[in-house]
Amino acid sequence: MFLVDDFLIWLAEELREIAEREITDESKLKEELLKVRTLYETDQIGEEEYIKREDEILQRLENIRKEKEASMASVKK
């Protein structure tokens, strides 16, 4: 029984770490930003849609950076 419990705890921790890396991965958001820009430049989306999506992505990037800064500040204390 303890083996199963230990495995489940390990699995939950691994999944949490993977999810955290995905959420805080700036490179994926930068790729998404580039894709949106390309869609706009090739007239596949309009200016309004481009601005909306760009703002959303930039806000997410800003949130990640703030979270990382807060994390670093708490580690230094």
Image (tube, grey):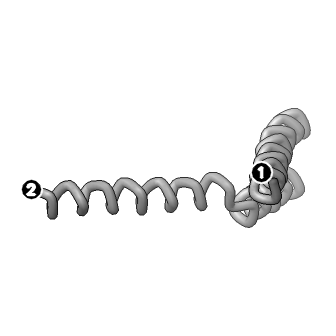
Distance in Å between CA atoms under marks 2 and 1: 37 Å
Q: Which residue is mark 1?
A: 74
Residue at 36 percent across and 54 percent down: it is: 12
Q: Secondary structure at mark 1?
A: helix
Q: Which residue is mark 2?
A: 1
Residue 23 x, y percent position in the rendering: 62, 52
Residue at 74 percent across and 66 percent down: it is: 27
Q: Which quadrant of the figure contains the N terminus? A: bottom left
Q: Nearer the viewer, residue 50 or 59?
A: 59
* Res. 10 image quadrant: bottom left
Residue 50 x, y percent position in the rendering: 85, 42
22 left or right of 11 in image: right
* Res. 56 image quadrant: top right
Residue at 89 percent across and 56 percent down: it is: 41
Residue type indicated by callout 2: Met
Q: Secondary structure at mark 2?
A: loop
Q: Is residue 46 above or below residue 68?
A: above
Residue at 33 percent across and 60 percent down: it is: 11
